[in-house]
Amino acid sequence: MNNFFKDKVVIVTGASSGIGEAIAREFAKNGSLVVLAARSEAKLIQIVDEIKAARGEACYVTTDVSIEEDCKKMVETTVAKYGTIHILVNNAGLSMRAKFDDVDLKVLHRLMDVNFWGTVYCTKYALPYLVANKGSLVGVSSIAGFHGLPGRTGYSASKFALHGFLETLRIENLKNGLHVMIIAVGFTSTEIRKHALTADGSEQGESPRNEKKLKPPVYVAKWVLKGIRKKKRNKLLTWIGRLTALFQRIVPHFVDWAYYIEMSREPRSPLK
């Protein structure tokens, strides 16, 4: 990365596992000063210790992004320790799998609280520092933010909301030099499907997909850094995602059926 990220102050939410952990480690490898935020303090401590053992610089702030005061504290702690913020990666996220007919509305509220409002809260308090540094604001998203996915109404709704929020901020800050990137990562081997909420709000417990065949989190992490360095706008990491974005403008009905068939093939699919 030619020292592009050296001494940059970076906050990564949802950093206790999966994509967030990989992103935090990748920034640390490239010389950034990394603040890891998540709910699991024990996991955060372990990751920070490992980063420091590898001669990286990192700290953590225990954070539930669905709580505004936690997000404010996260930003204040970062600024108190490192003086500013150059990059905010809004990665914390929650998924679901249930038909809207069956789902308890508290599930949709929870998805919006984490995926949308978590990004709003973190961004609200970090934005002045990002603008002052002409920094980068990143939203880790999904093809579900470009095209609705059956059985994932709350997830798709939260990602569409996320996209609208970030795209508007991009426009509002055109004169300020703020870089805003939405990255749609595709299916990645993480814990998100095990923790996905079912119709009654309980966790799914196991993944409906073969995790061994999915891309590893480090693959996404490297693309996040590359996208920031190249000031990318929207980045879809999979060819399926790119084809979806193209074909939904040409043959949207075909895309609807393609996703219905794909999701109905999952084990224990709510569409069956």
Image: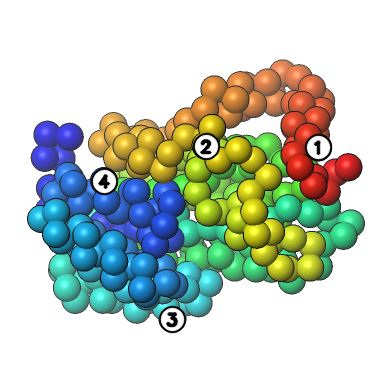
Which image quadrant is residue 149 in?
Answer: top right
Q: Which residue is mark 3?
A: 69
Q: Amino acid at mark 4?
A: Glu
In the foreground, 205 or 247? 205
Which of disc 1 and disc 4 is earlier in sequence? 4
**Residue 247 in the figure: left or right of residue 75:** right
Q: Which residue is mark 4?
A: 26
- Judged from the image, the secondary structure of the residue bearing numbered disc 2 is helix
| Residue found 80% across the figure and 47% down from its top | 268
Which of disc 1 and disc 2 is earlier in sequence? 2
Q: Which residue is mark 1?
A: 264
Question: Residue 212 — which label?
Answer: 2
Residue 224: tell me if it is visible.
Answer: no
Q: For the residues carrying marks 4 and 2, which lies nearer the camera in this image?
A: 2
Q: Amino acid at mark 3?
A: Glu
Which of disc 3 and disc 1 is earlier in sequence? 3
- Judged from the image, the secondary structure of the residue bearing numbered disc 4 is helix
Residue 185 in picture, x, y percent from top left: 49, 38
Q: For the residues carrying marks 2 and 3, which lies nearer the camera in this image?
A: 2
